[in-house]
Structures are given as C-alpha cells and as structure tokens.
Image (spheres, rainbow, N blue to C red):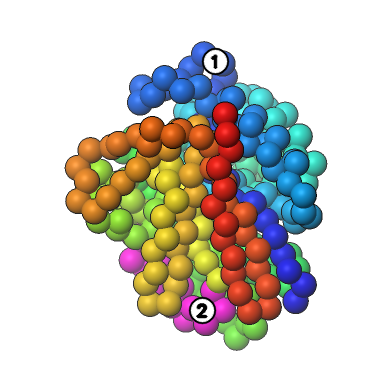
Amino acid sequence: MQPLTFVHISDSHLATDPAWSGPLTDILPRPGAEALLREIVALPLPIDFVLHTGDVHSDPERPEEYRQAADLYRQLRMPVYFLPGNHDRSDWLQQELMGIDEPAAQADQEFEIGGVQFLLLDSSAPGVDEHYGWLEAEQLDWLAQRCAADDPRPLVVALHHNPLSLVVPWLDGIVLRNGEALHEALLPARARLRCVFYGHIHESVLTLRDGIAYQSVRSSWFQTQTWHGQADPYKEPLHWPGYNLVTLTERDTFVRHCRVRL
C-alpha cells in the first residue's frame, strides 16, 4: 500500500455565541479551532482527509447551529469525517455536516481509503447528561462481524469516548460504559488493527492492551493534564490546540503529536 496520511482532531466545542467560553475555562473555543485549521491547510505534505472525533458543537439548541461549523471546516478543502460527541446532537450533525436527509439512530460509518478499512462508531448516548458513552448491542454486533471477517486490509477504528479506564477517577466517570465489550469485539482483528482513535478527554494519551493501541488527541479548545488516581480535573497551563498527524504504511503506524501556537 502507498502511505496514507490523515489528521485527527477533536473537541472543537464551537458555540453559536462567539463570547461563550463554558463553565470550566475562560478560553474561547473558536480562535483555537481557526488556528488549528490554518495549521492543517499549511501543512507541507499531502493530507488524505481529516477525522474529527466529536464534540464539534457545545450543546446546540437548533440544527442550523451546525452550519457555522460547516462553514469553518469547509476551509480545509479536503474530506472531513465527523463523529458526534456527548455535547453534539447526532441527528443534527448528520444532517448539517454529513448531508444525510434522514439521519440514522447512530452515525456509524464504514469506508475504505488507500486500501485501509475505517470503522467509525457513534458513542454518544442520546438524552444523557453525565457525558459518558455507550454503544448499543447492534453497534457492537456490527463491529464484531467486521473484526471477525477474513479481511487482509489494515483496520482503523474511531469513536468519541475514552474506551477503557484511564485509572483517573474523574475521567472514568465519563468513560465509554461498555468499553470492555468494545475491546472484546476488537480482539479478533488485533493483527491488522492499527489503532483506535478517540477524543473526549482533551489530552494525548496512549493505552496499549492485548496488542491494541488506543490513542487520544488534544482539543482545539483547552487541554487537560491527568495522572493515575487524579480525583479532580486539572487544566494544562499551556492551552495551545493540538492535533495528531497519522501516517499508515505497509508495516508501520506513525502518530505525531502536534501543537499550534496561539
């Protein structure tokens, strides 16, 4: 296979009110997202696509609020694959960002680029205020069937929520609640599974379990910094936006962690 390169971003948390900064910080989300996009456009290498793993918006009240995000990400002039996060509305995101007239219950996606199979899972749980994630039984069955198939293609999986415990109490409260079932579904494909990418935690963390790599990405808004046993959130003093530059080759998977100076 020819090298395939994509950019992984997450948690832009755009708001309709340009002065909104949320209850956790005084940092505005839009300037970071705009700086991040300028950086991606200026990268001196060909990018096949951008993967956004959710929390595109912050608790929108109307579907048309996503049109601001659509206008912003249209500047990339390359394919962008969106997943909903816990602060998104999956149906509105599908309508406004994915162009789907009749949204599905979950915004799961499957596609192939450059000989690589991509499986994107919608882990948002409608009507839940606690911010944790959940995969329905039919989603896990859909994933398990594809992971058990006799398929030689390299595989990449993505979702919004942290799938496994990070041994950080406050993060484990907003984890994918059935992440262990997700991991079991992935095991038959681990020989070809390059990585599971996710967002949600506003931090870059790599977890290795049973030969499967789980890699998160920083936010374009503000960053957290965590350690084992941490009870309360801690915001990283350097809040510069971050993204992961991912390259897949015949044998290797490269994940480069990048920051954007503000």
**Residue 168 % position (x, y):** 25, 50
Measured in 3D between alpha carbons, the distance from the residue under mark 2 to the one under mark 1, in whole angstroms, is: 44 Å
Which residue position is annotated with label 1? 17
Q: Residue at x 75, y 41 (%)?
A: 42
Circle 1 Cα neighbour tier, 10 Å, few/some/many (<14 / 14–19 / ≥20): few
Whether 180 is drawn above or below 152: the answer is above
Quarter assignment of residue 109: bottom right
Whether 74 is drawn above or below 247: the answer is above
Circle 2 Cα neighbour tier, 10 Å, few/some/many (<14 / 14–19 / ≥20): many
Q: Residue at x 36, y 67 (%)?
A: 181
**Residue 162 % position (x, y):** 39, 53
In the foreground, 258 or 161: 258
User: Which quadrant does the N terminus fall into?
Assistant: bottom right
Residue 83 is one of the magenta-drawn residues: no
Span colored in magenta = 178-193
Which residue position is annotated with label 2? 189
**Residue 103 % position (x, y):** 62, 44
Residue 185 is one of the magenta-drawn residues: yes
Task: Return the residue found at the far bottom.
Answer: 150
Whether 169 is drawn above or below 55: the answer is below
